[in-house]
Image: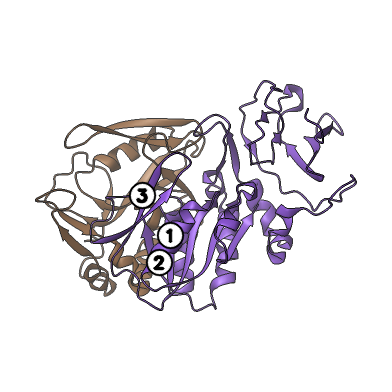
């Protein structure tokens, strides 16, 4: 569902600002660095605008952002569409009572947490991150939200890595 | 109780929160608790406790059962001191006049949740995640910063990982500045410059991408809270090392007793809630 491909002039401008850093965090990985996009006010704003245009008027009351780069894109979207922002964090960062979801990494496991009470049953939610690779983190986020009865309307990312297989088919919105 | 430390506690009616006044160093403070009056629990933290509202700082020998229900800050009206001694109230004077009177502040303050004993016993953690659930209060928070900075020719908003990433980008977008994340070590993929800084126990390192900012740019540093000022100081040093002029540091919350403002020295600090 790359709804915007070839149809929006802003896309190329956004794409051009993303820097690829070879061999980070380890040899063989071509890291997609969005920090260079953040240095360009117009392109950063265009990125947010494109998400906002898609999601305003969809009755979304929750934007959940995945630590830490989801914290950069999620809040501006939340503010613009009038939704609350819920940070999904690594273990032991959130101070209050949490629910946790474990997920698989390439080597080993990790855990994503959300505050109890942040989201109510039947709320409509958007999950935001800078990039989707295997989809493991997004799956954990979806599970967390669905466990408390929220409806995950869509996941939204700036970048998709097309060569990695998505392990769980949900509703994904891809910009590229 | 130690000499010079007196405490008065009253409750106007069964339905109202407890309002507690205490005198410390000759200054009258007040704090209120949203604790259920039928389950009276006041947490007395140690003398080194710095977050006074809505909890009371008192000798640690006095302990009552802790009510762990959600407790929120209360925006207190300016106090009229009726006790002897110094009637100045440093923490109120540290706030800018505009924000002390802005009607949006009360809603922002009351949306912040206080979590006792996090991340370790004795710390009263100021949790802004509840502010982010209040769409009006969150928008007001950003608006207050944007109104202050939009005409100040600021081209860089630097946000400190990770909660500075929540407040910084909306401000940057609204004022037309770029956003620069200041991160823990090994998170940024490109070439970085690093600045070491002291923690209570040990040291930590903050990093910024080389080339993110240019000499001569005017910058704002954003974080959710300023405590000792160590992290903000490291961010200031990082930016100044590459020739950037740090115009101001902006935080939602200040813990004035930890003297972060003093540690920043001449660098201005603007906070909404203290």
Cβ atoms under marks 1 and 2 closer than 8 Å: yes
Which shade is chain B?
Answer: purple
Q: Are discs 3 and 2 both within one chain? A: no
> Which residue position is annotated with label 3?
A68
> What SS does tag 1 mark?
helix
User: How dense is the environment of label 1, judged by Cα within 10 Å: few (below 14), some, or many (20 and up)?
Assistant: many
Chain identity for the colour brown used in the image: A
**Which residue position is annotated with label 2?**
B239
Camera-nearest label, 3 or 2 = 2
Which of the labelled discs sits on residue B235, or is there none?
Answer: 1
Percent position of residue B13, x then y: 86, 31
At a point 28% along the width and 66% down the height, the residue shown is B210
Q: Height in image: B158 above or below A67?
A: below
Q: Secondary structure at mark 2?
A: helix
Q: Left or right: where does residue B182 sit relative to residue A85?
A: left
* Helix, strand or loop at mark 3: loop
Q: Can marks 1 and 2 be said to lie on one chain?
A: yes
Residue B205 numbered tag: none
């Amino acid at each position: 569902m790359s709804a915007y491909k070839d149809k929006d002039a802003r896309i190329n401008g956004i794409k051009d600002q993303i820097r690829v850093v070879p061999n980070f965090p380890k040899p063989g990985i071509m890291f997609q660095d969005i920090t260079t996009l953040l240095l360009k006010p117009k392109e950063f704003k265009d990125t947010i605008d494109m998400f906002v245009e898609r999601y305003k008027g969809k009755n979304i009351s929750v934007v959940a952002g995945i630590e830490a780069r989801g914290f950069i894109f999620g809040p501006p979207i939340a503010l613009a569409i009038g939704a609350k922002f819920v940070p999904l964090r690594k273990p032991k960062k959130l101070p209050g009572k949490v629910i946790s979801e474990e997920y698989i990494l390439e080597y080993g496991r990790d855990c994503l947490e959300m505050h109890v009470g942040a989201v109510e049953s039947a709320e409509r939610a958007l999950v935001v991150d800078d990039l989707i690779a295997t989809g493991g983190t997004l799956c954990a986020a979806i599970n967390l939200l669905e466990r408390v009865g929220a409806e995950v309307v869509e996941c939204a990312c700036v970048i998709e890595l097309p060569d990695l297989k998505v392990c769980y088919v949900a509703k994904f919105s891809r910009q590229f | 109780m130690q000499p010079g430390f007196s405490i008065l506690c009253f409750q106007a009616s069964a339905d109202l929160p407890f309002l507690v006044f205490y005198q410390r160093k000759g200054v009258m403070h007040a704090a209120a608790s949203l604790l259920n009056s039928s389950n009276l629990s006041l947490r007395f933290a140690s003398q080194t406790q710095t977050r006074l509202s809505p909890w009371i700082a008192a000798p640690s020998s006095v302990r009552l059962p802790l009510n762990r229900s959600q407790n929120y800050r209360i925006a207190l009206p300016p106090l009229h001191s009726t006790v002897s001694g110094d009637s100045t109230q440093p923490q109120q004077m540290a706030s800018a006049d505009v924000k002390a009177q802005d009607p949006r502040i009360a809603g922002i303050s009351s949306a912040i949740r206080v979590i006792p004993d996090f991340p370790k016993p004795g710390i009263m953690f100021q949790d802004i995640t509840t502010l982010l659930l209040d769409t009006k209060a969150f928008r007001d928070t950003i608006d207050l910063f944007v109104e202050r900075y939009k005409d100040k020719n600021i081209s860089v908003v630097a946000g400190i990982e990770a909660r500075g990433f929540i407040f910084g980008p909306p401000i940057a977008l609204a004022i037309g500045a770029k956003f620069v994340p200041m991160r823990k070590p090994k998170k940024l993929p490109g070439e970085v410059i690093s600045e070491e800084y002291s923690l209570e126990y040990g040291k930590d390192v903050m990093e910024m991408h080389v080339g993110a900012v240019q000499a001569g740019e005017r910058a704002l540093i954003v974080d959710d809270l300023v405590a000792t000022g160590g992290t903000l100081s490291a961010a200031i040093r990082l930016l100044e090392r590459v020739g950037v002029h740090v115009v101001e540091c902006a935080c939602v919350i200040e813990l004035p007793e930890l003297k972060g403002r003093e540690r920043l020295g001449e660098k201005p600090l603007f906070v909404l809630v203290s």
